[in-house]
Amino acid sequence: MDLLLLSFAGVTAKEYLTLLNKSWISPELKKKINYAGSLDRKKIIARLDRDNIGYLTHEHGLYPALLKEIYDFPYILYYRGNAALLKEEMLGVVGSRKATAYTRKSLELLLPSLKNIAIISGLAYGADEAAHRTALSHNIKTIGVLAFGHNTHYPKTTAGIRTEMEKNHLTISEYPPDTPIQKWQFVARNRIIAGCARGVLVTEAEEKSGSLITLEMALDENRNAYCLPGSITSALSKGTNLRLKEGATIVTEAEDIQSDFV
């Protein structure tokens, strides 16, 4: 199977699993497979080269070992930047899009003290942006996971740091370059953050927050769960405080995280 062509034909990670497991193939998947066979591989490669986009499959030596362990792992990753960063130990950092100065100040305190750990997040507004900016300002390796193709960007506020990351760090996506934004892809993106990381830190989160879904994904994959404690009067700390009561590791200093990366 040519995984690049399957990807450009729209074959999803779950559909690829059915092919691997030789399960029943739906008529829709058959159409995609037939379409993949009609695609011109040389033209696709030339287009990727033009857009400065590389790719690697789950069979490649640089593909993250931890990510390969999750159920619906992405069978292909497109990237801009230094793909060798995928072999680094990673900490996922997520949180509310409404993150306050507490997130930024806490990350400024914690991240520079971590050793040999790359920061992976979703290039979203709020906590993700704070994580990437803190990493960049302290020359910490950082990886951004896109929920769309590389020829798209959202939100505008992180376009500048994305450009910087693609020069000296890394952005990845499981989607072909021209894939537009769709709401469900943001949830799918979270499984890649959780899957790549040895642990996930949530800085601030409402009681019902997408970042807590990422934390749950991490727990499902036996990753470490970290949360910042927050004020009981803050709605943005309600989610994290509840997770701490349920057993997540409280983080008040870098060593609370570093001790798990040995």
Image (cartoon, rainbow, N blue to C red):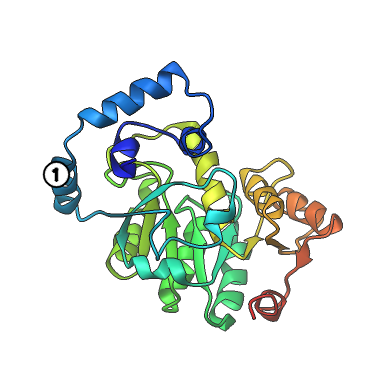
Q: Estimate how packed mark 1 is, as few (under 14), some (14 to 19) or many (20 or more) residues with alpha carbons within 10 Å.
A: few
Q: Which residue is painted at 41% across and 78% down in the image?
A: 139
**Front-most of residues 18 and 216:** 18
Q: Is residue 196 above or below residue 125?
A: below
Query: In the rendered view, would you say 221 is above or below 71?
Result: below
Residue situated in front as seen by the camera: 17 or 192: 17
Residue 88 left/right relative to 40: right
- Note whether 33 is above or below 201 in the view shown: above
Looking at the image, the residue that sits furthest to the right is: 245
In which quadrant will I find the N terminus?
A: top left
In which quadrant is the C terminus drawn? Answer: bottom right
Which residue is the site of mark 1?
42
Q: Give the mark count.
A: 1
The amino acid on which the numbered mark 1 sits, given as a three-letter code, is: Lys
Q: Is residue 29 positioned above or below 125 on the image?
A: above
Q: Is residue 142 left or right of residue 151?
A: right
Q: Nearer the viewer, residue 226 or 107?
A: 226
x, y percent for residue 27? 43, 16
Image location (x, y in percent) of residue 257? 67, 74
State left or right for residue 79 relative to residue 104: left
Counting from the top left corner in percent of width and height, residue 222 is at 70, 58
Side (left or right) of 147 relative to 179: right
Secondary structure at numbered mark 1: helix
Identify the residue at image location x=36%, y=63%. 170
**Residue 127 seen from this side:** no
- Which residue sits furthest top? 27
**Residue 38, picture quadrant:** top left
Q: Tell me which residue sits at (63%, 77%) in the image.
A: 261
Do we see residue 218 in this rendering?
A: yes
Which residue is depicted at the point 20% across and 56% down?
52
